[in-house]
């Protein structure tokens, strides 16, 4: 793997951890829609790093999602429940960012932080192996 790719993988993992920290701050302030957005992006950056390590990439979020499922969930390299979490965050971020009158309830989304943290940890282990 060339040095530029390694730099980009590490950058995306840094962005994932940064986005997760941002999500925690937003949750504490009650900004649930933006909190969901940051959780999604934390997972998105991690998946992007995983795909890049494996020579895969896409210019679209839906393409990243499809490749993640095709190459890692379907092949049982990553637990299917993590795939379902990624889908939930993808769909929720779309709703929160683009649909009118959508407001996530704190009680409904607060537990997603721990799930996203676990997601990042699990995918990062696969990247590092």
Image: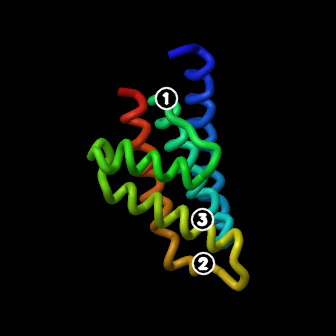
Residue 26 appears in view: yes
Which residue is nearer to you in this view: 73 or 106? 73
Classed neighbour count for the residue bearing mark 2: other residues with Cα under 10 Å, few (<14), some (14–19), many (≥20): some
Residue that appears at 55% across and 37% down = 57
Residue that appears at 37% across and 55% down = 82
Q: Residue 54's image quarter?
A: top left
Task: Report x, y in % for residue 44.
Answer: 55, 49
Q: Residue at the far left: name it.
A: 76
**Residue tagged 1:** 55
CA distance separating discs 3 and 2:
8 Å
How many marks can you see? 3
Check contact, mark 3 vs mark 2: CB within 8 A: yes
Classed neighbour count for the residue bearing mark 3: other residues with Cα under 10 Å, few (<14), some (14–19), many (≥20): many
Residue that appears at 60% across and 78% down = 104
**Camera-nearest label, 1 or 3:** 1
CA distance separating discs 1 and 3:
28 Å
Q: Residue at the far bottom: name it.
A: 101
Q: Secondary structure at mark 1?
A: loop
Task: Report x, y in % for residue 92.
Answer: 56, 70
- The dot on residue 36 is 3
CA distance separating discs 2 and 1:
36 Å
Task: Report x, y in % for residue 4.
Answer: 62, 18
**Residue tagged 2:** 104
Which residue is nearer to you in this view: 98 or 70? 70
Task: Report x, y in % for residue 5.
Answer: 58, 22
Classed neighbour count for the residue bearing mark 1: other residues with Cα under 10 Å, few (<14), some (14–19), many (≥20): few
Check contact, mark 2 vs mark 1: CB within 8 A: no
Q: Work out whether 31 lies above or below 56.
A: below
Q: Secondary structure at mark 2?
A: loop
Q: Work out whether 48 lies above or below 94.
A: above
**Mark sitting earlier along the chain (3/2):** 3
Which residue is nearer to you in this view: 107 or 45? 45
């Amino acid at each position: 793997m060339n040095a530029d790719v390694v730099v980009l993988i590490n950058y995306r993992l840094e962005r994932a951890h940064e986005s997760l920290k941002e999500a925690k701050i937003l949750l504490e302030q009650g900004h649930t829609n933006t909190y969901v957005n940051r959780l999604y992006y934390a997972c998105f950056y991690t998946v992007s790093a995983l795909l890049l390590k494996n020579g895969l990439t896409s210019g679209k979020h839906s393409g990243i999602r499809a490749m993640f499922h095709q190459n890692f969930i379907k092949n049982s390299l990553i637990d299917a429940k993590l795939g379902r979490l990624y889908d939930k965050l993808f769909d929720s971020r779309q709703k929160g960012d683009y649909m009118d009158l959508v407001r996530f309830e704190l009680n409904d989304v607060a537990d997603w932080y721990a799930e996203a943290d676990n997601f990042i940890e699990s995918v990062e282990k696969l990247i590092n192996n």
